[in-house]
Amino acid sequence: MNQPLAPAVRIDDMPGHRIRRLHQISVGIFLQELGDMALTPVQFAALQTVAHAPGVDQRTLAGTIALDTSTTGGVVDRLEQRGWLERRTAPDDRRVRQLWLTEAGQQVLAQAVPAVQRAQEQILAPLDEADRAVFLRLLQRLVDTNNAHSRAPGDVSR
């Protein structure tokens, strides 16, 4: 028995496909710029968040960088194993683990930021300043409006 053919669609015209491709490109550029640092975009986001909110708890970190709590736990484990983050028990609630950058974490972040900025510039290089502003504004609108559909919604109140 013959199966009916699926309707013909051009995946290159689908926004989800283009977003996935841009994500692949973005990660590739990120890893190229950071070279031997062996730091992923998600790890960078975690370090950057902890740097600007010392003592943040792991659940809040997960919401801030839009990851589920178990994935965040793995990210924090790896960063802690590398000596870049440390967990401390919250003084007012022993069940809560607060996160702090170590001196080595501060150093790696200081080294990573210029490379990450170069990566962002390279991603946006095909766009002029006006197009960049429009692109980023529209991208933020899509993220904010569709945030609830994520498996790990981010904190859009930032």
Image: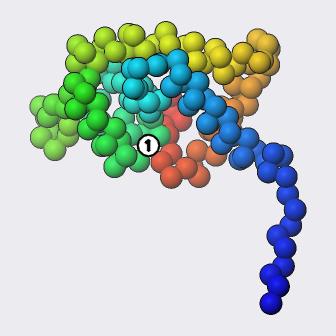
Which amino acid, by three-letter code, is at mark 1?
Answer: Leu
Determine whether, in the image, residue 81 is placed left or right of residue 14: left
Residue 14: where, in percent of width, then height? 79, 48
Residue at image x 58%, y 18%?
119
Q: Residue furthest right?
A: 8
Residue at image x 82%, y 70%?
6
Q: Looking at the image, how many numbered discs can be counted on the residues?
A: 1
Determine whether, in the image, residue 80 is placed left or right of residue 6: left
Determine whether, in the image, residue 144 is placed left or right of residue 15: left
Q: Is any part of residue 9 visible from this angle?
A: yes
- Depth check, front residue: 72 or 36: 36
Residue 5: where, in percent of width, then height? 84, 73
- Depth check, front residue: 35 or 105: 35
Position of residue 40 relative to residue 19, above or below, is: above
Q: Secondary structure at mark 1?
A: loop
Query: What residue is shown with label 1?
Result: 67
Residue 134 quadrant: top right
Categorize mark 1 by other alpha carbons within 10 Å: few (<14), some (14-19), many (20+).
many
Determine whether, in the image, residue 44 is placed left or right of residue 33: left
Residue 121 quadrant: top right
